[in-house]
Image: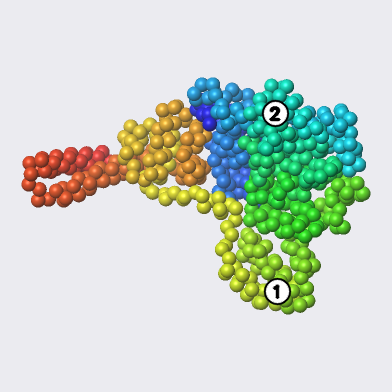
Amino acid sequence: MPKVTTETIDAVNTQTDLVSLVENYTHLEKRGYDWWGCCPFHNEKTPSFHVIPDKKMYHCFGCGAGGSTIKFLMEMEKLSFIEAVEALAKRAGIPVVYAEGQYQPSADDTFKDALLELYQKVSGTFHYFLLQTSEGAKALQYLQERAVSPEMIERFNLGYSPANRQWLFAFLQKKGYSQEFLARTGLFSTKYPQIAFFSGRIMFPICNRHGQPVAFGGRILEGEGPKYLNTGDLPQYKKRETLFAFSQALPQIRKEKTVIFCEGYMDVIAFHQAGITNAVAPLGTALTEDQVKLIRSFADTVILSFDSDWAGQEATYKAIKLCRLAHLQVRVLLIKDGKDPAEILMQKGAEGLTYLVKNSILDNDYLVQIAAKRFDVMSPEGKAQAAAFLFPYIEVLESDIQKESTLQRYSADLGISSTALFTDFHQYNQTKEPVPPVQKREAQKHIALTMTAELRIVLAAAANPHLFKTMRAELNSDNFEDPAAKDLFIVLEECYRADANTYDSLLAHCPSDTLRSAVSNAIIYGEFAENPEKLVRDGIYYIKQNALQRQKELIVRKLQAAHGCRSVDEIQQVNELLAEKLHIDKMLAELKETM
């Protein structure tokens, strides 16, 4: 990956208004010199998200999220450091300068960029075939019969892949693409490289968060074959991490803090055509944890709109558990009689879909309804089966209060005594490994720092960068025993030598999330704001004294090991150790006099 210069990072930090940036994601109100609002990273009703404009820092007292301007955009939009810097630089009109001069992308980056360019062109070609050729007429007629409006065809750039499976390869070769490159694009059969993967299908471009086509879904019109085909994973596209229509839905998801997960492409288009533009869909598979994590940054409520058959019920149950593990509220949209959103739109118009969304039910109501349909809850065996069916849901609820109240609710619904239901759930829980919430699993990836005296001293210098000049004149990294303190001292030294004196630069150089979080907290909480000069001065004395004491203890151990030595070389070594010990004793005495 390229490295941007510290001058670019500093310019981005200086010229980006953090308050303005954050207000793209949550409403802020000014209190004194700072700004407060509900955290955009987790669900809360009482504002605990704090923005400190003069320090270009933010912190949530609820979930602990915090950092600098660049980190905020990284976390909010799930970008790499370089991508966040480039995005903010573009926003502020700042040229990005790379540390090693003009950035030369790697072969992988070049290939990924070429794929993005190719998929953009092919998407446009398929769109042309749908609207402008006789070959695409049948596909266009199908969309019109499904009441897909011209506006939706344009918004989603729908297309048609020609039935001739050799046409696309010949067409792209004439455009200058090599056979070797085309074989790696996912557009052709792996066994027969000149045969198009998609043929005779309505094409649904799948876009990344920036609206760039990165893959395709194709629906067959006639003949044999799977109803839908999807592009396999590629460097620019991971099916498990991508959602259809995410870029189109994101503005409304941010506004409503709610997302609708649908069964497929046509369902999504129907919702959007009805003006319900926060609908997205997984890509040919069940909802994944990665897709839920993508949404969690922007929404706190999920509405599930899957089929009502057995498979749809199982997919809904799995999605409920995934979303609950991510601390999302969940509702379920009920469509009866095997109809899908497109049929509802055709028969009842936008009002029909709007009514269904407004009357979606809570996930616990949905599951108890399913249990009552699947099992004979009038019999003891059926009651036990229904309870066992519901226990996995109760297990993933966030708090004991939620679990207890849900068990009491199900006790009444199923006609089971609360004591019996609680006992059975406890036994069920004892036989299973507890499932940690997504946020806890992520936190377990990081080892917590021990707040040693050494680390506190270097954190004081990090929070007050002007004091590091004094510290580095007296200490070096070898003086530190605590690895985290040593790492932070090295980071401060790197920033000092690069004349990168902003908090953003400091945080960007931190080698781990735990260290970055410790520095962020030290800056935000103001723990080292009162008389930091004395703290750093006393800290220098403490660290130097400890370093000298460690050297002295090592020499003493060597002298003890050499006790009874008689050879000339051994006596010479003992004398050198004694001289070194006397020198250290003298340095300790002089150090004490300076305090």
Left/right placement of residue 516 relative to residue 378 reads: left
Among the two numbered marks 2 and 1 on one chain, the one whose residue lies closer to the N terminus:
2
Q: Residues within 10 Å of mark 1 (few under 14, many from 20)?
A: some
Q: In the rendered view, does 30 fall on the left or right side of 496?
A: right
**Residue drawn at point x = 66 percent, y = 27 percent:** 179
The amino acid type of the residue labelled 2 equals: Leu
Tell me how the rendering is colored: rainbow
- Tell me the quarter of the picture where residue 174 sits: top right
Q: Return the residue nearer the eye: 499 or 1.
A: 1
Q: Which residue is mark 1?
A: 384
Q: Residues within 10 Å of mark 2 (few under 14, many from 20)?
A: some
- Expressed as whole percent of the image width and height from the top left, the position of residue 81 reads 56, 35
Q: Is residue 575 visible?
A: no
Which percent across, then down, holds residue 530?
Answer: 44, 42
Mark 2 residue element: helix
In percent of width and height, residue 148 lies at 87, 40
Per the model, the C-alpha gap separating discs 2 and 1 is: 56 Å
Q: From this viewpoint, is residue 403 visible?
A: yes
From the top left corner, tell me how far across and down residue 299 is, in percent.
Answer: 69, 47
Q: Height in image: 477 above or below 64?
A: above
Q: Is residue 437 above or below residue 137?
A: below
SS class, disc 1 = helix
Asked whether the beta carbons under mark 2 and mark 1 sit within 8 Å of each other, the answer is no
Disc 1 marks a residue whose amino acid type is Ala
When asked about the image quadrant of residue 379, the answer is bottom right
Residue at the spot 47% in from the left edge and 35% down from the top edge = 509
**Mark 2 vs mark 1: in front:** 2
Q: Which mark is residue 195?
A: none
Closer to the camera in the image, 223 or 402: 223
Q: Residue furthest front?
A: 192
Q: Which mark is residue 118?
A: 2
Quadrant location, the C terminus: top left
